Amino acid sequence: MRLIDLVETSVELGTALDPRGPEALRAQMERRRREYEALPAWQQPYYNRERFRNPFGDVRIANGPAETELRAVLLGIDIHLAEILLADRLRAAGTPIDAVIAHHAHGIGASPFLSWDSMSVMVDMLAAEGVPRADAEASIHPYIEEKIAQQEDFHRSGPDTARLLGFPLACIHTPADYYITVGVRAALDAGGVDAASSVGDVVRALLTLPEVDSSARLGAAPRIMTGEASRPAGRLLLKFGGGYILPPSAYPLLGKAGVGTVVQIACLPEHARAAREAGVTIVRVPHAAADNIGINLLLDAVEARRGPLPVIACGAFERISRRTPSGS
């Protein structure tokens, strides 16, 4: 498969899983085109026109050529200069590496305003749980602007280095994050976890995932950040996708809407405090383990469509395939 095939197939798979639905994403892309056309001519060169055909702001080919045939890729959750230098060292030692693939978007050169294309789905996630849309927007929209305001231009260093060393570089984030939800939901269903189950039952079900088991054996297991293991889990929100964890202001809204437990990546003290005050339990899945679930399931789905893709894992990524030898 080519690099463009990997990226475009990931976008297609992510679109199928997006809680907003394909029609809403098509409408978003059309709005982006109208935004561009309404700009004065001097601003148009700075607009990322890939937004017309790719709804995810954190899926990009940062350095081409897009037509590169992929015999093998170096793939990591975080790709920094060290990982690109590692790719160069491996290539010098005879390992074929045709591209470097990052999961997280920092360091791959994506423009910061693309946060609107990766984070706004959190409004729909809250609304799906019964939060009034106006309240969800009042929580999430300032959060997006806050993230944009924090951005600097050092994110160009990854593409600059990849270009100097002759490596195509790409990032695939949101579609893989949506597959975390697929994997976690399957584990909870297999474990018989429902609203009447305990929070401890949620943790035990998470440990049946091979990526989480691997992380726990390194000392990083799922953690209950608020509440107790014996507490009923209540209605569960599996919060994966959206670029970042929810802002603290979202937890009172979820508690009022009847959500009992949020399963998520990461949890800062301000998030725990807000959730605790709202009576919402947070179960934190170790970050790399969660990302590994999503990337692995996404790669399995890509391979089912496009054929095998040899992956050299780095940067906290561990390739665990769920496909059978026959590919079924």
Image: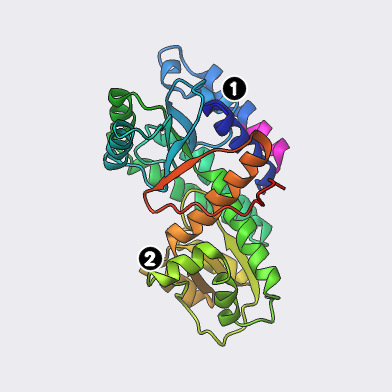
Which residue carries the number 1 mark? 34
Residue at 37% across, 46% down: 78
What secondary structure is found at the residue carrying circle 1?
A: helix
Camera-nearest residue between 124 and 10: 10
How far across and down, in percent of the image, does residue 316 sit?
A: 39, 54
Residue 126 can be seen in this image: no
**Badge 2: few (under 14), some or many (20 or more) residues near its Cα, within 10 Å?**
few
Residue 284 can be seen in this image: yes
Q: Which sits earlier in the primary sequence, circle 1 or circle 2?
A: 1
Q: Which colour scheme is used?
A: rainbow
Residue span colored magenta: 19-28
| Figure check: 152 above or below 222 | above
| Figure check: 90 above or below 315 | above
Q: Is residue 8 left or right of residue 195?
A: left
**Badge 1: few (under 14), some or many (20 or more) residues near its Cα, within 10 Å?**
few
Q: In which quarter of the image is the N terminus?
A: top right
- Asked if residue 22 is among those painted magenta in the image, a careful observer would answer yes
Residue at 69% across, 70% down: 190
How far across and down, in percent of the image, does residue 280 sit?
A: 54, 74
Q: Is residue 16 left or right of residue 145?
A: right
Measure the alpha-carbon separation of dots 1 and 2.
38 Å
What secondary structure is found at the residue carrying circle 2?
A: loop
- Asked if residue 200 is among those painted magenta in the image, a careful observer would answer no
Residue 273 is labelled as none
Which residue carries the number 2 mark? 268
Residue type at tag 1: Arg
How far across and down, in percent of the image, does residue 323 sit?
A: 64, 51
